[in-house]
Image (cartoon, rainbow, N blue to C red):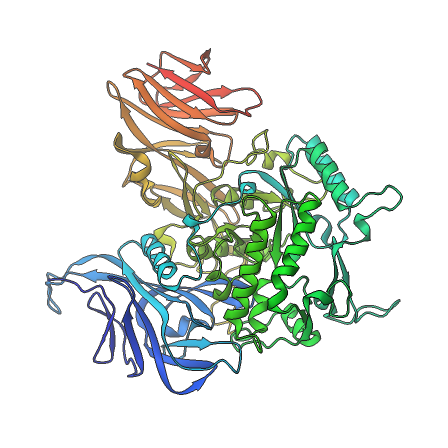
Amino acid sequence: MTVAALPSIHDGKLLIRDKVVLNGVPSNVVVSQASEDSAFLGATSTSENSRHVFNLGILEGYKLLCLYRFKIWWMIPRFGSAGSDIPVETQFLLLEAKEVSPFQEDNSLLSTTVGSFYTLFLPCLEGPFRSSLQGTVANELQLCVESGDSNVKSSSATEAVLINSRDDPFDLITNSIKILEKTKGTFRHIEHKEVPAHLDWFGWCTWDAFYKDVSPQGIIDGLQSFQEGGCAPRFLIIDDGWQDTINEFQKEGEPAPEGSEFSIRLFDIKENKKFKDPESHSDLSQFIKTIKEKYGLKYVYMWHALAGYWGGVLPSSEAMKKYNPKLVYPIQSPGNIGNIRDIAMDSIEKFGVGVIDPKHIYEFYNDLHSYLARSGADGVKVDVQNLLETLGTGYGGRVKITGQYQGALEQSVANNFKHNNLICCMSHNSDCIYSSKMSAVARASEDFMPNEPTFQTLHIASVSFNSLLLGEIMVPDWDMFHSNHSTAEFHGAARALGGCAVYVSDKPGTQDFEILKKLVLPDGSILRAKHAGRPTRDCLFVDPVMDGRSLLKIWNTNKLSGVIGVFNCQGAGRWPCKDQHQESPDPASALPPLSGHVCPLDVEHLEDIAGENWCGDCALYAFSSGSFSRLSKHESMEVSLEILKCEIFTVSPIRVFGPNIHFAPLGLLDMYNAGGAVEALSCDTDRVITVKTRGCGRFGAYSNTKPESIKVDSQTRDFTYNAEEGLLTLTLQGDCCDGRVVEIIY
């Protein structure tokens, strides 16, 4: 019997692989083929409007994962089993079902479960409209379609949601995004973008260190303290506080009105007086030149908002008049306030935004970026991007104005900076996500907040789940963290396997260099994993923050190994939910350590890394405990963690070479992502295995037999061998700026 994969509607039921996904589907809901085995879902109305909410049917009986915007800027996950668990502004809905044998009969004792299969609902863009999903208390799944401009109307949205189904959830997501890339043409998959080079180097951001009080001397103090500690950053983000801005609502000598800090406007594209010294003739250009030369910085990024600043630009400024700005009062969609209102957005709505005419937005970006490039800057971090969805009225709607601004921004970055040096931030709406043709890096969660103890577990969990979607289109940026913080190990370990940039925001002189040296090599480079770190398959539908029993496992790959991070995120916080329908977690002090299991096959597609010589077993090295194990690919081992603790496992497939030599390189054992140091592996003869590696420190590998000798760059080196475990270690000395060739001779 053939199981139909193409979604279809029959007798009021949405069927996928002959399984009912939605019951009670109204007659105005339509399905059209998108690819060989996927379809678009949409609906029609009898009247034209700029916003429609369509009922799609009843959703019950599935494990489900939502990624939804809990506030205008950011997504977080939600877990459940029915339509009522789906919040407004859901932008990603993944279902899991058990597939049963097609030959069984109801109530048959021979009924068998074949395995899980997964269905993805992916709301997308259709012309000037964007879509999102939401549920009702009656378990109805609803489709919201909106333009953001009362003058942009339609009576139908027939390609509003992509529906696709596969046995592998990760392949499903990748395949679905590539279908949208091809059919919509408004964005590109991450495989088709240039990835900025700063991602491979350690960085420092000025935000938490100084906030808006950033100054040249403060930056110099910070760079000096990093250099003295032996861990100098190679990229720098000069965050908010360098621009020439004005708060027109604050009267001299009086405090600023409440909320007006979010309506400060850009007065000029050049730096403010803090970065100018008339006596020494110093300015931003001279400052950047100085710090690059003295501290070895490779990349300096400058912060700005997509609209110029939080409150846009000052329309009355002589420097801004050429861009034809005007004061506009944002209009928030019901979805923006359907979960949690945001004080920044509410304040901007109250005080207005100085909006640059979209016809002149490229001119603005080009003027700004060319000035920064001439000053020595290498790229930009562009914030407050979702603001545009509230400014669509009179500009053709939210999708159109977002596309215009995003396209102009990307073109300006391409024209003025090398290597696509752009970081997007506060950009978690589908308008931005599906308008990014060149942008290759985006912040993946709300800010790291050092003074909010209940936010730390939420940060790690939300980034990993958000990366399921964002990681197909961008390199997720996990944000800065503090190396000297009660959760520094927790955050540092997560960045090591996130496939992301590693950067901190420590105040000068407060760094913990023991933490940093587990992330950063002496030359300032990092051991970045290959992909976006994402939850393992068995964690996709469990709540790692509030169910009180589940550990969070995050997987990634290196060139020749896998890596699994296990995190206890329970008990330290709760998901922000307007309806508060979830139970509160037990206090952290009341929770015992949690246990779970790690299996080599938690690393997806491990066989592709292992190659033809894989024997089917893996060497597992646990960073924190230092324990080492050999497991078959189907075996698992137990891990137990206290709250806010983590463990990282390097998973190296064991290859068979020559006369029954079993070998697996582990990498630099004192680095969180040990396997990221291994560049290549070969066996030139039956008795010589060659490993190309980078970095210095304690190098480890598994070998089932003791080598006769080991050479590093043709020089014989001492090594230790534990015959009981098969763990082989040696020390790679030096500055480690260049790669090393390690020859293991049997």
Residue lying furthest bottom: 46
Q: In the displayed structure, does residue 90 sit left or right of residue 418?
A: left
Residue at the spot 44% in from the left edge and 62% down from the top edge: 186
Can residue 576 be seen at all in this image of the molecule? no
Front in this rendered view, residue 722 or 193: 193
> Residue 315's image quarter?
bottom right
* Quarter placement of the N terminus: bottom left
* Quarter placement of the C terminus: top left
Q: In the displayed structure, does residue 582 sit left or right of residue 682?
A: right
Q: In the displayed structure, does residue 540 sit left or right of residue 733?
A: left
Query: In this rendering, is residue 154 above or below 568?
Result: below
Residue at the spot 47% in from the left edge and 29% down from the top edge: 669
> Residue 742's image quarter?
top left
Q: In the displayed structure, does residue 526 sit left or right of residue 20?
A: right
On the image, the x and y values in percent for residue 555 come to: 41, 45
Query: In this rendering, is residue 731 above or below 114?
Result: above
Front in this rendered view, residue 548 or 529: 529
On the image, the x and y values in percent for residue 734 come to: 56, 20
Residue at the spot 66% in from the left edge and 50% down from the top edge: 370
On the image, the x and y values in percent for residue 201 come to: 57, 38
Front in this rendered view, residue 82 or 381: 381
Query: In this rendering, is residue 503 above or below 51?
Result: above
On the image, the x and y values in percent for residue 745 come to: 35, 14
> Residue 556's image quarter?
top left
* Count of number-bearing discs: 0
Residue at the spot 83% in from the left edge and 68% down from the top edge: 255
